[in-house]
Image (cartoon, rainbow, N blue to C red):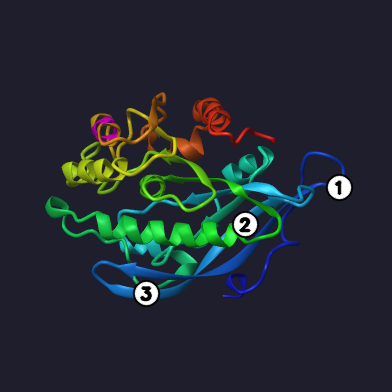
Amino acid sequence: MAIARILLAAALLLAARGAGAAIVEELVRVPVVVRHEILGEVRHELPVTVFRDDARPRAPFVVLGHGRATSATANAALGQARYTANSRYLVSLGFAVFVPTRIGYGIAGGQDLEYSGECAAKRYAPGYDAAAQQTRAVVAYARGRPDIDPGRGLVMGQSYGGATAIAVAADPPEGVRAAVNFAGGGGGRPSTHPGQPCSPMAMEQLFGGYGATARIPTLWLYAPNDRYMGERHPRAWFEAFLRAGGRGRFVALPEHGEDGHSSFTRNPGAWRPAFEAFLREAGLEPGR
């Protein structure tokens, strides 16, 4: 596809702060080598959507991870991960935003590295490790750009991407100061078993393992009517992370619609105050 081969720097020019400033969107390709516990070495190129303010010569960076659907067909149909509205909001705070489409999804193509097995016997770690390796590759790419402040970075994500942000926090690459988890977890069954994800204890053990080595601050945001993760399990996962030594804050968002799992994109007013306060505490002040 042509969209996967060319830069879109001139495709999206939206008015931003100050005369002559603009938000620029571009699509780049980042080579990655994933060493998968089960599948071995996988070489690929990640399509990464970049949003930046062309009037800002050197910006802190965010790597923003997408979620995972409940079917292989839906994952393949993702297209190009962008989170346009939230990415533009992050640019308004002063960040350059990097949104990778991971291997096995949408325009990235390739095999599914995040399949974790049958519901009652999930093996979550290999998939999250694969996603974390891809995130770290994007961090390295971002830090090598002349328009990026390499010492002021943030990883964040929604759903599968949120748990991936915590996986990255367990072994953060240089320059990453904090991680934000929006509704993170795995095994959600919103249609058949709302609020009852597969193998939740395996997810709890995984988060506990991440907490044993994570030393950067983390923010966890969940709505109680999350049909994927439920209300009880995310708190247990967070407590396991803290008990093991992790640093974090859990924010219970208000219920939203029929499924609070989508609060990241559909209810931004509920989480932005806590998010911006967290940025200030982490030394990533908005607009700085």
Quarter occupied by residue 223: top left
Q: Categorize mark 2 by other alpha carbons within 10 Å: few (<14), some (14-19), many (20+).
A: many
Give left or right: position of 220 versus 118. Answer: right
Give left or right: position of 191 versus 6. Answer: left
Q: Residue furthest right?
A: 19
- How far apart are labels 3 and 2 at the CA level? 24 Å
Name the residue that disc number 2 marks.
50
Q: Residue furthest left?
A: 120
Give left or right: position of 48 versus 145. Answer: left
Q: Residue at x 47, y 38 (%)?
A: 264
Q: Residue at x 25, y 49 (%)?
A: 187
Bounds of the magenta segment: 233-240
Q: Identify residue type, mark 3.
A: Val
Name the residue that disc number 3 marks.
42
Q: Residue at x 39, y 31 (%)?
A: 248
Q: Categorize mark 1 by other alpha carbons within 10 Å: few (<14), some (14-19), many (20+).
A: few
Residue 165 seen in the current view: yes
Q: Identify residue type, mark 2.
A: Val
- How far apart are labels 1 and 2 at the CA level? 19 Å
Q: Secondary structure at mark 1?
A: loop
Q: Categorize mark 3 by other alpha carbons within 10 Å: few (<14), some (14-19), many (20+).
A: some
Q: Tell which circle, 1 or 2, labels the residue nearer the N-terminal end.
A: 1
Q: Tell which circle, 3 or 1, labels the residue nearer the N-terminal end.
A: 1
Q: Main secondary structure of the magenta part?
A: helix
Q: Nearer the viewer, residue 259 or 156?
A: 156
Residue 255 shown in magenta: no
Q: Secondary structure at mark 3?
A: strand
Q: Identify residue type, mark 1.
A: Gly
Question: What's the mark number on residue 20?
Answer: 1
